[in-house]
Each structure stands twice: as structure tokens, then as C-alpha cells.
Image: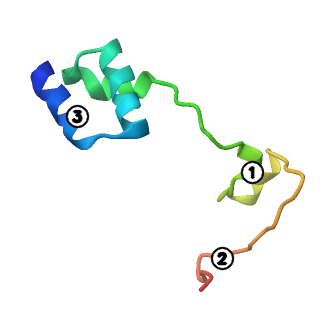
């Protein structure tokens, strides 16, 4: 994909955070190498990890303690409705 075509597509379809991410990726490499440059970009999360919901096995949750935890136990055979 030509650079100008890639920019036109980004202008037409991307907004906000996605557009900023595109700009960072295309500054570090041409649009043809977008997949590779996106793999190397570190993106900060806007949420604090201790405030977010975590879906993980118990052993992983135990490795990252939180002040308040609500555990929902599931087995392979049942899911909450």
C-alpha cells in the first residue's frame, strides 16, 4: 500500500486513540510494515489495573493481590447466566 493511500484510508476510517496509534506506528516504519511496528509499540492503559475487572485462573489472581476481590467460581461445565 502506498504511503499516501494508507494516510487517506487512516483519515477516512480512524478517529481518536486509533488514529494516534496509527500515527505512532507509521512514524517508526512505513505503512507496508505496519504489523511489525504495531507489535513494538507500547501503549499505556488509561485504567489502573487495580480498578479493573480481571478474568483469570485463581493462581494468576493470587499472584497480583488487590485490596478488594470478589471471586466467581466456574467449572468447565457451567457458566453464569
Mark 3 surroundings: few (<14), some (14-19) or many (≥20) residues within 10 A: few
Mark 1 surroundings: few (<14), some (14-19) or many (≥20) residues within 10 A: few
* Disc 2: which residue: 75
User: Quick check: marks 1 and 3 in contact, CB under 8 Å?
Assistant: no
User: Quick check: marks 2 and 3 in contact, CB under 8 Å?
Assistant: no
Q: Residue furthest right?
A: 67
Q: Nearer the viewer, mark 1 or mark 3?
A: 3
Q: Position of residue 38 (x, y in %)?
A: 38, 28
Q: Nearer the viewer, mark 1 or mark 2?
A: 1
Residue 18 lies left or right of residue 5; in this view the side is right
Q: Quadrant of the C terminus?
A: bottom right
Q: Quadrant of the N terminus?
A: top left
Count of marks overlaid on the render: 3
- The residue located at (60%, 38%) in the rendering is 45
- The residue located at (10%, 27%) in the rendering is 5
| Residue 51 image label | 1
Q: CA distance from mark 1 to mark 2?
A: 25 Å
Tell me how the rendering is colored: rainbow
Residue 43 lies left or right of residue 51; in this view the side is left
Q: Position of residue 27 (x, y in %)?
A: 33, 14
Residue 69 lies left or right of residue 21; in this view the side is right
Q: CA distance from mark 1 to mark 3?
A: 34 Å
Q: Nearer the viewer, residue 56 or 7?
A: 7
* Disc 3: which residue: 11
Vertical order, 4 against 13 (above or below): above
The mark that comes first in sequence, 2 or 3, is 3
Amino acid at each position: 500500500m502506498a504511503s499516501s493511500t494508507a494516510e487517506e484510508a487512516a483519515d477516512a476510517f480512524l478517529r481518536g486513540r486509533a488514529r494516534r496509534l496509527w500515527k505512532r506506528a507509521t512514524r517508526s516504519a512505513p505503512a507496508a510494515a505496519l504489523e511489525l511496528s504495531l507489535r513494538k509499540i507500547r501503549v499505556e492503559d488509561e485504567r489502573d489495573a487495580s480498578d479493573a475487572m480481571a478474568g483469570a485462573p485463581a493462581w494468576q489472581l493470587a499472584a497480583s493481590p488487590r485490596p478488594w476481590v470478589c471471586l466467581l467460581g466456574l467449572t468447565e461445565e457451567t457458566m453464569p447466566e
